Image (cartoon, grey):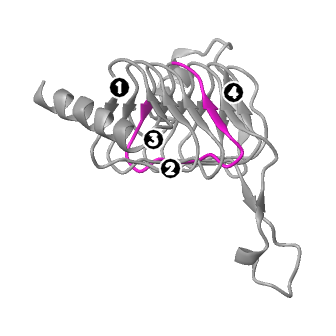
């Protein structure tokens, strides 16, 4: 109970320091998380942001729905915009990058060539993103999908898909019925309990 009060007080302090931060009811924002300035950030009701998570609008925006868990050391870089639906679980050490560096010229350093975005990253409702995933610029992840630990998602994901690997590929669909032997390992597909 006391930790909940600390998180709620921290969320209120972050809101005072950054007027572009909009918080729903019951948001728990760990005092060791970091919501940067540089664009609007909104967190829906009962969303949890854990220690070390970084919400970096980068001139874009970050919108997180209700009942979402953003676990330890997740990075949300929202230059092109990030929209996360309701009931989403994002496991630790995952990164969403809604922007890219230019690198077409070799006569000037890449860091000086600017950035661009193909569009926002959208994660629809009821998605589980496993630990150490990377979700790249312009991607939409459909409702009910599971992104396995370590996957790199560079293309849109159909609803209820199970995505694994580098680059991320569809290895199954949650709508398909699984036999007991096939379903036995599903509890660990995303690498940790979110």
The label shown at residue 37 is: 2
| 73 sits left or right of 110 in the view | left
Q: Earlier in the sequence, mark 2 or mark 4?
A: 2
Query: Which label belongs to residue 191?
Result: 3
The boundaries of the magenta stretch are 69-86
Mark sitting earlier along the chain (1/3): 1
Q: Which-is-in-front pick, marks 3 and 2?
A: 2
Name the element at disc 3. loop
The tag earlier along the polypeptide, 2 or 1, is: 1
* Residue under the point 43% across and 43% down: 18
Residue 56 sits above or below residue 162 on the image: below
Element on which disc 2 rests: loop
| Residue nearest the viewer, comparing 12 with 54 | 12
Nearer mark to the viewer, of 3 and 4: 3
Q: Residue furthest left?
A: 2
Q: Residue at x 74, y 58 (%)?
A: 100
Residue at the image point whose x is 82% and y is 72% from the top: 103
Q: Image point 18% across, 34% down: which residue? A: 6
Is label 4 in a helix, a strand or a loop? strand
168 left or right, relative to 104 = left
Which percent across, then down, holds residue 158?
A: 76, 25
Disc 4: which residue: 172
Tell me, yes or no, whether the two marked residues, 1 and 3, touch with CB atoms within 8 Å: no
Q: Gap between marks 2 and 4, in whole Å? A: 39 Å
Q: Are marks 2 and 4 in contact (CB under 8 Å)?
A: no
Sequence-wise first label, 3 or 2? 2
């Amino acid at each position: 109970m006391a930790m909940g009060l600390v998180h709620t007080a921290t969320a209120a302090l972050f809101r005072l320091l950054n007027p572009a931060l909009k918080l729903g009811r019951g948001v728990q924002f760990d005092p060791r998380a970091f919501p940067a300035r540089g664009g609007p950030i909104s967190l829906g009701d009962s969303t949890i942001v854990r220690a070390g998570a970084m919400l970096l609008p980068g001139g874009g925006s970050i919108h997180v729905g209700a009942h979402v868990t953003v676990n330890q050391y997740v990075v949300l870089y929202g230059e092109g915009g990030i929209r996360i639906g309701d009931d989403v679980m994002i496991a630790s050490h995952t990164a969403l990058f809604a922007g890219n560096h230019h690198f077409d010229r070799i006569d000037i350093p890449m860091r000086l060539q600017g950035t661009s975005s193909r569009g926002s990253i959208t994660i629809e409702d009821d998605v589980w993103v496993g630990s150490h995933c990377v979700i790249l610029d312009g991607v939409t992840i459909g409702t009910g999908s599971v992104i396995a630990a370590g996957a790199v998602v560079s293309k849109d994901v159909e609803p209820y898909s199970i995505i694994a690997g580098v680059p991320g590929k569809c290895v199954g669909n949650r709508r398909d019925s699984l036999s007991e032997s096939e379903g036995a390992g599903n509890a660990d597909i995303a690498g940790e309990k979110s």
